[in-house]
Image (cartoon, coloured by chain):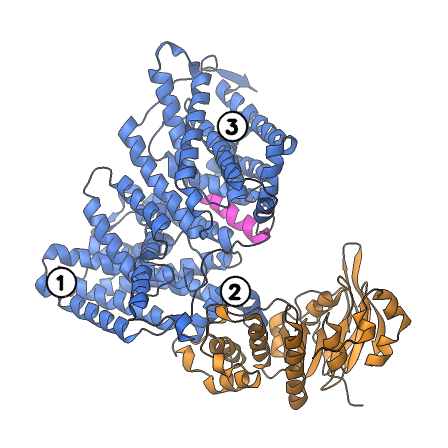
Amino acid sequence: MSFYFAQFLTGLSSASSLFLVACGLSLIFGVTRVVNFAHGSFYMLGAYVAYALVQFVPGSILGFWGSVLAAALIVALVGVVVEILILKRIYNAPELYQLVATFGVVLLMQDAILLIFGGDDQFGPRAPGLDSVVRVFGEPIPEYDLVLIALGPIVLGALWLLLNRTRWGILVRAATLDREMVASLGVNQSWLFTTVFFLGSFLAGLGGALQLPRVSINLLMDLSIIAEAFVVVVIGGMGSIPGAFIAALLIGELNAFGVLVLPQATIVLAFVVMAVVLVIRPYGLLGKAETLAHVAGQVELPIRPASTLAKSIAGLLLIGLVVMPFLAGEFAIVLATDVLIFALFAASLHFIMSNGGMVSFGHAAYFGLGAYGAAFVIKYAGGSMELALLAAPLMAAAGALIFGWFCVRLSGVYMAMLTLAAAQIVWSTAYQWQDLTGGDDGLLGIWPSEWAKSKTAYYYLALVLCGGGILAMRRMIFSPFGYTLRGGRDNPNRTESIGINLRQHQWAAFIIAGVFAGIAGGVYVFSKGSIFPDEAAIPRSVDALVMVLLGGVQTLSGPVVGAGVFRLLEDEISRLDYWRAILGVIIISIVVIAPEGIAGFIKKIAVKAGFERNEEQAS
Amino acid sequence: MSDPVLSVRNLSKSFGGLKAVSDVSFDLAKGELLALIGPNGAGKTTCFNMLNGQLRADAGQVRLNGTSILGLNPRRVWRMGVGRTFQITATYASMTVRENVQMALISHHRKTWDIWRPASGLHVEEAMQLLDLVGMREQAERAAAILAYGDLKRLELAIALAHAPELLLMDEPTAGMAPRERVRLMQLTADIVAERGISVLFTEHDMDVVFSHAHRIMVLNRGELIASGSVDDVRNDARVQEVYLGGGTLFEGQAHG
């Protein structure tokens, strides 16, 4: 019995830590509607800065608690700088753009911290006076954990006072309910957003700094905490702070006791709980339906079959791709195979996201499932490459069938978060189920059949499968099914009111996108000869989003152009030190400077120069 | 008199303690244009939402040609031959005018699961005929996003006619339009439904539109039907005058050109 109580207390202390991070995230989302991926980076920064202050500030002027507070303040200021320099410019952009931009900040911060603090794991000191254990029912409980347990409710209470008893708090609550209304009442929104970001980042920094005596500090803290914080915020209801508290308790205890029952599946468990909560309560435990979806971006124009010019360019491209192996070296062939694979992967995301309006932040799940599905056939069934390439889309489709059923029940940010959760489930399963997937060591030695062994032969195989997939999806976009999806994106009510079961169509689209992502994954695994859990991780999902964004969300040729540019770019910069930072800057620049993407930009030029039809003039 | 197309009995709906619609009963004959009027908050839209399945009724019966349709979802109700236009226009902004109508036709002909044939070639003739009917043929290739408001209303009408409905529910068909255009749109609607024998139930705030086109009027106040009858009956009804006290246009019947 006493053991379970001790476990319960452990759960409470981790719930407090989780709450500190999640409430800042929820606060920022509630007011600015930005899903801030960089929140985890602020948490990590808080830990590193506190570590540095404790270690290197001479004579313990600050002391432990002084260092923790100072670190949180420094993080808050960094947060304000990020808000002013980047986020202020994209508050009216679609969610996707914001999320990708904040992921750019994640990359930037990773390299900044690597540069300043080095890449080694760091171990912080114990908190002075709290370095021993107390016996609770005979079980040892670290004193520091008891402090953390108390801290959660204290912060909740302080936030409650701040939000309910101050003028600033009333404005924040009003802005959470209706941003436009608050603006029209003459409140300085810009100032309000900056202060909210200050407080939110402060809380993230505090949460990170407080981890100093508990865990080792490393460069993986950001993404692992952000995934958990997203879960907490979504379960609690985005924007609701009491909701975040309840959800943090739920997840904290789930982890504490889940470890006893299913030690291998703790990460999966949290995401499963989230999926179940969202299906029962689509806006989280204490969240409310979004009153108005903010739609500020430009209105999309009707799609047209490719113009003669575009067809000629596509034809030239195809001829170029076919003759390429005769002209280029082996290295270029391998790179081109990669581009083809990622073009199909990006196109499959584009299919549901741009055409169907379903933003998937976890598309890597289906890429990963396809890759593992193919690998399993080789490793465990002794099957051939041909059979494996058939298993890849089937495995991905099965995943999309299950996850899609949950996801299409939601919309907007909640749907995006659930797709992210689905990808985390796949990733953590691949990571933790060592017997099947080899865990972090991956599965090796997965090579193509004899006839496709040469780089050139495999390139042609990839060209047929990926090129065919892209063309097939393009054809679907122009089909009644594709139009139905676009209609559902434009106006779901209208779609239902002309007798269409939108959810079923969206589910089917989700599965189709999964199939093609799975094919991409299958082709990928044979081109590399191995598969690791990273292929289903968050950065891989973001890659797909960046490729679509880079090419232009609203342009049908966008994913192909985006994948090409992205892979070539990545190939160039990944040889440099601090390539993550460079990539981060590129991502942020695209979102801020050229949100219509490369293909969109070229199309705009073509219209201006008179090569392409302009819709406005045509009418 | 032949059997009514739509027959509503004791339809009721409460939101918490508020009785939004209570005990509403009426019949709608084939080819009839029936206006449902009443002040804001009288329960008109709630009635509509129950009739087309968007909202679950607390009690009552709704029969379409004798078949109960209460409790069916909007999709089923649409398939049974009930069309609806919205108070705030609902069209596909990123499609052309023609494509908007084609979408309704594609759904009507149950082709939304076709993933291979190009949609642009499907039911073009039918779509163009419908656009002709509402006077939008010239604008068929324009994007819906750039249409004038009155044209959007016409487009909605064409969409609503696509599945050859027996009954049209029109929620404030002329809201937000210039006075001259209002009467013209309603005249167009009246002509089309007369020709095709479609029954129409519509709500409207503009009394000129109501008085000049409705065959019959029902007045809803605080969820209850307080009057029903011909235009003159309703105009002269004492309770209706009380409800609309101050609403001068109702009784003077100002004529717009």
Front one among A262 and B92:
B92
Q: Which mark is residue A477?
A: none
Left or right of A42, for residue A240: right
The answer to if A103 sits in the magenta stretch is no
Q: Can the viewer see residue A294?
A: yes
Snapshot quadrant of residue B173: bottom right
Considering only vertical position in the picture, is B45 above or below B168? above
The chain coloured orange carries which letter? B
Q: Along the polypeptide, which appears first: circle 1 or circle 3?
A: 3
**What amino acid is found at the position of numbered circle 1 in the picture?**
Thr
Residue at mark 3? A13
Asked if labels 3 and 2 touch by Cβ distance under 8 angstroms, the answer is no
* Residue A140, position as x, y percentages in the image: 50, 19
Q: Residue extending furthest right? A: B238
**What amino acid is found at the position of numbered circle 2 in the picture?**
Arg
Q: Which mark is residue A503?
A: 2
- What subunit carries mark 2? A
Considering only vertical position in the picture, is B37 above or below B215? above
**What amino acid is found at the position of numbered circle 3 in the picture?**
Ser
Asked if labels 3 and 1 touch by Cβ distance under 8 angstroms, the answer is no
* Residue A576, position as x, y percentages in the image: 19, 40
